[in-house]
Amino acid sequence: MPRSCSVLRVFTRDGEGGNHLGVVTDLEGLDTGSMQRIATKLGFSETVFIAQSDVPTVRIFTPAMELLFAGHPLVGAAHHLFETGSPATRIRCGIGEVKIRRDGEMVWVDAPMFHENAYRDGAIFARRVGLRDPRSTWRVEMPLDYRVVELASADDVANAAPDVGAFGAADGLALFARSGRKVRMRFFIPVAGVPEDPATGSAAVALATRFAAGGELNGEASIDQGEEMGHPSRIELRWEGRVASIGGTVAVDEPLELSL
């Protein structure tokens, strides 16, 4: 029997672009395998399955795997809950409960910052994947293994062509350049079936983790992503202590009918 799938674009920029997200709330008869098959068939970078309760539970699937944590699915799930009248102020995912809130058109998720370190073999990693002259390379557990590489300019980020087949132990790669509070970012996570992602909340949290580890204990940034894919996106980022807040606007597209 067909079931409905809402389709959102999360982290839009001036109403355009954003990262597509499938949202399924009718979970009757769905097990882990069928959720994965739906996510694979849809082909979005992520699809979420929401179980309603006082603290709704969100399961997140890419075309290739289930994730414990991801930013754009949680912001999208929060938007869906708010739009459907849910009073929830928290949602539960694979890492535990996170706070959600709405401020005007912006939807925010407060996420914990994970472990980070200055990656001692960062230059070797950068050369292996084809990146020249990185300013820094950090490793951040999200809890997947992300490498966060700073390049000299936004043009360097735009023109980069990392070898996604040479990541080795790394699961994901975030490239960024920063000018004041403006950040230009790209993100690659082939292990999840997503060669490049147009808007990545978890990578924004990884950036906050890296900035805090570098001595910026609090701050904010506006992250642009997705131009190379034709999906211009914007993530607003704030961090303080060990919490990073990711926020953005969400657009609603026509729903889909799913059949297994």
Image: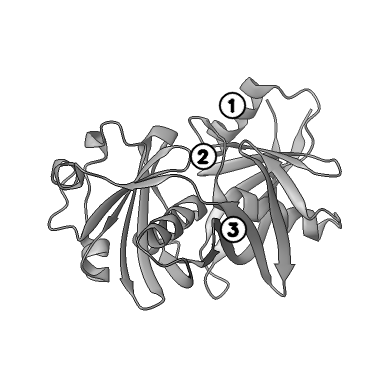
* Kind of element beneath mark 2: loop
Tell whether 3 sits left or right of 124: right
Q: Residue at x 76, y 32 (%)?
A: 2
Looking at the rendered structure, the kind of residue marked 3 is: Arg
Identify the residue under disc 1.
37
**What residue is disc 2 on?**
43
Where does the image place residue 1, in percent across and percent down from the top left?
Answer: 79, 27
Q: Label 2 sits on what residue type?
A: Gly
Earlier in the chain: of badge 1 and badge 2, it is: 1
Where is residue 71 shown, x and y percent of the image? 56, 51
Q: CA distance from mark 1 to mark 3?
A: 21 Å
Residue 106, compared with residue 226, is above or below; it is below
User: CA separation, marks 1 and 2?
Assistant: 10 Å
Q: Amino acid at mark 1?
A: Arg
- Mark 3, residue position: 9
Of the numbered discs 3 and 2, the one sitting upstream in the chain is 3
